[in-house]
Amino acid sequence: MPNYFLDNPDILFHFNTFDLKEVVAITEDDYTQSREFSYAPTQYEDAMGNYRKVLEVVGDLAGNFIAPRAAGVDHEGATFANGRVTYAEGTRKNLRQLSQADLMGMILPRKYGGLNFPFTIYMMTVEMLSRADASLMNIFGLQDIGDTIRKFGNEGQRMEFLPKISSGEHTGAMALTEPDAGSDLQAVKLHAYQNEQGAWFLRGMKRFITNGNAQVLLVLARSEPGTKDGRGLSLFVCHHDKTVKIRRIENKLGIHGSPTCELQFNDTPAQLVGSRRFGLIKYVLDLMYRARMGVSAQALGISQAAYEEALKYARERRQFGKAIADIPVISNMLIDMRVTLESNRSLFYSTTQCVDVKEKLEDKIEKMKGEGKSVAEETARLKHITKVANLLTPLSKYMLAECSNRITYDALQIHGGTGYMKEFHVEQLARDARITNIYEGTSQLQIVAASGGVINDVLGEMFEAKEKREYKGGLTRLANHLKEIRRLFLDSLKYVVDKKDTGFQDVAAKDLVEMYGSLYTGYLLLDEAEIEPRKVFIANRYIVTALAQARRNAEAIRGELFGDLLHASKILQ
């Protein structure tokens, strides 16, 4: 009986090496919640034991129930008739089981029926479920809608919406995108207005809304007449009532189990979340942290599934008198897939822990302010960790989504012609992976989002400290490789900055971001190799390859290619 938690040694390694002491302590109010809730942990080890039990349950559900239904969900898909969306039968069963296991409110407080789990543990759940059926993430993973209401809504809104999200009776959706406002959310036009009594109503269109049939909708709308930028936008929550019309669902390449809807709001009653004008510049940006992490977990789960399919097929398929897994060009592909998969996981869970610390510090600071305590020290720390999270979140989304596309492509290639047939699961994985580097911000936008932190070298002090460390045995050579990548990056950065040309800086951003990302991930793997012998091979393969790529990145920045790119607009006219 497969268990996607217990059967995955790399997931177990990360779980066993998590350092969530501070995060859990803040989450549990220094373990005082156990006074009100008998099932709340009384110490860190108790909490981690609870998390492990739940992850084992998720691993069992994913491997033995959700994964076997994935092909049926993909074939049937979500359907639309008479203005109503119906999930595939397998999706309905999946959601029922997840609700029965009390998993639909993992990150919501116990007060509202949730499990009160850290974000990192929640993301590990999302990874495993995405491995089983990537489309399920687009419903299960929208618990963040509830968390946004918790953070920025009032107590009445929390009591109205969160308990039903926790129970699984309601799901959520974020209605942001419009026909003329895709990645550029400042262009949102959907109108929010008040009547004479001060009640809010919504009027307009939203498009490409994931799980747009949800009962709870977070809507970004223009509340300030005459404005045209993000400062005129506010965030609203509303029920999906008869005033919200689903005009259609999209006929997509993949992720068939998740309905993507076009919505029409016809004077829909709504409630303002937080303060006016902060919809985009504060609340949606905060929500995007989690949304991008959710897609990263989805990409990681798809990558794991594709690798498992390729490895199984390569061991079973015989050509030229032997298993194709024993053919060097095939075994080399499988090794690269494994190294990419594990290095991505290291980057991902480092990022989730960073986001966890950031968000828990925010909660701690608010609590301390309410108690009249000084928050100067915590605020200074929050400022730094926010800069790091602002870098690592888009970096993770970029690297994991791009790698997921490459891994599924290679997995299908290993299958040969059979992989192109519907009978083999790998073709679905290749289709599902393709959206991960498009939605919640394309890869190109992730590069833009990460480039500021890269150019400002926000991890510089960490890298300097790492360079001073002495690594044991053969790891010294790898540490020297990382020093070389750092030198290449700094030389390239100086070259770009000295030009004082923003156009050139924009063109060079991709290569700078990739060097920086490989440097950070390389140090994560180096640290892991010191405590886990199995990781030595992963670290070696990754860092040696990263050094070669960094040299190419540096050469590209100084090469003639960039001159051509800067003048590409003339060629394309």
Image (tube, helix red, strand yellow):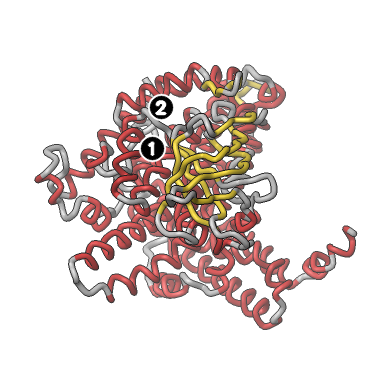
Query: Is 76 rendered above or below residue 327?
Result: above
Identify the element where label 1 is drawn. Answer: helix
Query: Is 571 rendered above or below residue 436?
Result: below
Query: Is 507 rendered above or below residue 241?
Result: below
Identify residue type, mark 1.
Answer: Thr
Quarter that holds the N terminus: top left
- Badge 2 is on which residue? 62
Q: Is residue 116 visible?
A: yes
Which residue is nearer to you in this view: 509 or 356?
A: 356
Name the N-terminal-most of marks 2 and 1: 2
Q: Residue 68 vs residue 38: left or right?
A: right
Q: Where residue 326 appears, x then y in whole percent?
A: 59, 31
Q: Where residue 389 appears, x then y in whole percent?
A: 44, 61
Residue located at (51% from left, 29% from top): 242
Q: CA distance from mark 2 to mark 1?
A: 9 Å
Q: Where residue 265 appears, x then y in whole percent?
A: 57, 39
Query: Mark 2 Cα within 10 Å, few/some/many (few <14, many 20+)?
Result: many
